[in-house]
Amino acid sequence: MSYGDVAEFAGTPAVRMVGRVLAQDGGTVPWHRVVRADGSCAEHLYTEQRQRLLAEGVRFIGDRVDMKSFRWDGR
């Protein structure tokens, strides 16, 4: 999901709050599964995030998650 997808799923317009919550969480939620709307990973966590997603079978197109195929719709 993108940060916006998570915010919409949670029923809030506060997209930036999603990133803040993930940053402060301490690792109890699968933060690596949340990417930017264009499929790009967090710059400061790029290597780890990409490795985790690849290990789960997520495909990339260049440096971005193939959002057309791998975006989760909340169901």
Image (cartoon, rainbow, N blue to C red):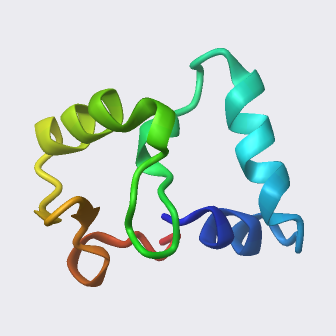
Q: In the visual, does 49 lie left or right of 62?
A: right
Residue 12 in the image: x percent, y percent?
Answer: 88, 69
Question: Which residue does the image show at 22% across and 59% down from the upper left?
Answer: 63
Image position of 25 with respect to 41: above or below: above
Image position of 40 with respect to 33: above or below: below
Q: In the visual, does 14 lie left or right of 73?
A: right
Place residue 2 in its image quadrant. Answer: bottom right
Question: Which residue does the image show at 50% across and 52% down from the upper left?
Answer: 34
Image position of 45 with respect to 73: above or below: above
Question: Which residue does the image show at 57% across and 31% down from the upper left?
Answer: 29
Q: Residue furthest front?
A: 43
Residue 74 in the image: x percent, y percent?
Answer: 52, 70
Q: Residue furthest bottom?
A: 68
Place residue 68 in its image quadrant. Answer: bottom left
Q: In the visual, does 68 lie left or right of 20?
A: left
Q: Residue furthest top?
A: 26
Question: Which residue does the image show at 42% across and 47% down from the upper left?
Answer: 33
Q: Across the whole image, how many numbered discs are drawn on residues?
A: 0
